[in-house]
Structure formats: structure tokens, C-alpha cells
Amino acid sequence: MTKRLLLIAHAPSPNLQALKTAVLRGARHPDIADIEVIEKTAFDAVPDDVLAADGLILGTPENLAYMSGALKDFFDRTYYAVIERTEGLPYALYIRAGQNGGDGTKFAVEKIVTGLRWRAVQAPLIMGGPYDLAFEAQCEELGLTMAAGLEAGVF
Ligand SMILES: Cc1cc2nc3c(=O)[nH]c(=O)nc-3n(C[C@H](O)[C@H](O)[C@H](O)COP(=O)(O)O)c2cc1C
């Protein structure tokens, strides 16, 4: 049966767009079958998107030592509609932190998803400091790992 992998990303800069594209490239790797990858912006994602997902990737910049307002808006709009209905949902998180931050966002997202009882499939990917093309390879790997894990049923 086809599984659904949902990417919810806030990508307000060209670099964040490139990271999102890299995640999608990994998640849609041609060797992976039976995974439908759905992409939503943090502002567009609604509770039904989450309820229909078998796995989730969240992407955000760190702004003012916290997740983007867009990702917080997503949680504000969906939290009570999905709590107790998505326990154990496997998720992964990537953070772009232009000034070498990232911990504030990691802490804030982890606090919320702990309440939701979602399950991290790997430690958050924090990409800090000056932009590095290697970030795109890391994002591609994250997308591939998530999709391959869902396909294999290991998450
Ligand atoms: C209002 C604002 C606040 C920011 N605050 C932080 C911060 O607290 N920590 C950090 O590491 N980067 C911070 N940044 C940098 C962003 O994380 C970075 O610009 C964003 O991830 C996009 O990456 P790019 O500049 O490579 O496109 C901030 C950027 C803006 C616009």
C-alpha cells in the first residue's frame, strides 16, 4: 500500500528553497516505490494533511532563536486537531540557522512534538553558519532516509 510522506517547509530564501528541493529529491528517489511525497508550506498545511501522513519532515529557518513564525503558525493551527490522533508519527526536522544558532528551534519543536508524541527518526539536522553546498547533500540524505525507512516499514 502506498504510504504518504509529508514535507512541511518554510522556505523564505533561495537557500532554503534549495534545501527544500534537495529534501524532495531524496524523498522522490527513483529507487523508492510506493511512497507518495506531498509538499506543503507551513502556512498551507492543515490538520487533514497531518492525519493522512505516514511520516513527516519539518523544515524551518531559525529566526530570533526560535522556529519560524510560519512553522509556529502551523503548530498553533493544527495542534489540538491532531493530538491523540497522530501518536508515534515518525518525523524528521531540519533547521537552517544562518548565524550558527539552531538549538532554540530544536528545543521549541521538540517540546511541541513531545506533547504530540511524535517520534524522531533521527537527530535534528542543524545547518548553521555560512551557507554550504554540503547542506543540500545532507538534506537529500534526510529525504531519502525518511522515504526509504517508510518504504521498508522500519519507522
Ligand atoms: C529576523 C531574523 C532572525 C534571525 N535569527 C537567527 C537566529 O536567532 N539564529 C540564527 O542562527 N540565525 C538567525 N537568522 C538567520 C536565518 O536563520 C537565515 O537567514 C535563514 O535560515 C535563511 O538562510 P540563508 O540566509 O542561507 O538564506 C535570522 C534571520 C532573520 C531574518
Image: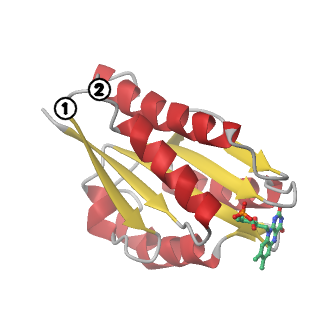
The alpha-carbon separation of the residues under discs 2 and 1 comes to 7 Å
Dot label at residue 26: none
- Residue 20 is at least partly visible in this image: yes
Q: Nearer the viewer, residue 68 or 18?
A: 18
Q: Position of residue 46 (x, y in %)?
A: 34, 72
Q: Nearer the viewer, residue 87 or 12?
A: 12
The image's colour scheme reads secondary structure
> Mark 2 near ligand 1 (CB under 8 Å)?
no
At x 50%, y 44%, the residue is 22
Q: Answer few, some or many: residues within 10 Å of disc 1's Cα (few below 14, many 20 plus, some between 14 and 19).
A: few
| View quadrant of ligand 1 | bottom right
At x 29%, y 62%, the residue is 49
Q: Answer few, some or many: residues within 10 Å of disc 2's Cα (few below 14, many 20 plus, some between 14 and 19).
A: some
Indicate whether 74 appears above or below 122. Answer: below
Dot label at residue 34: 1
Indicate whether 116 appears above or below 132. Answer: below
Say whether disc 2 or disc 1 marks the residue closer to the N-terminus.
1
Left or right: 40 in relation to 32? right
At label 2, the amino acid type is: Glu
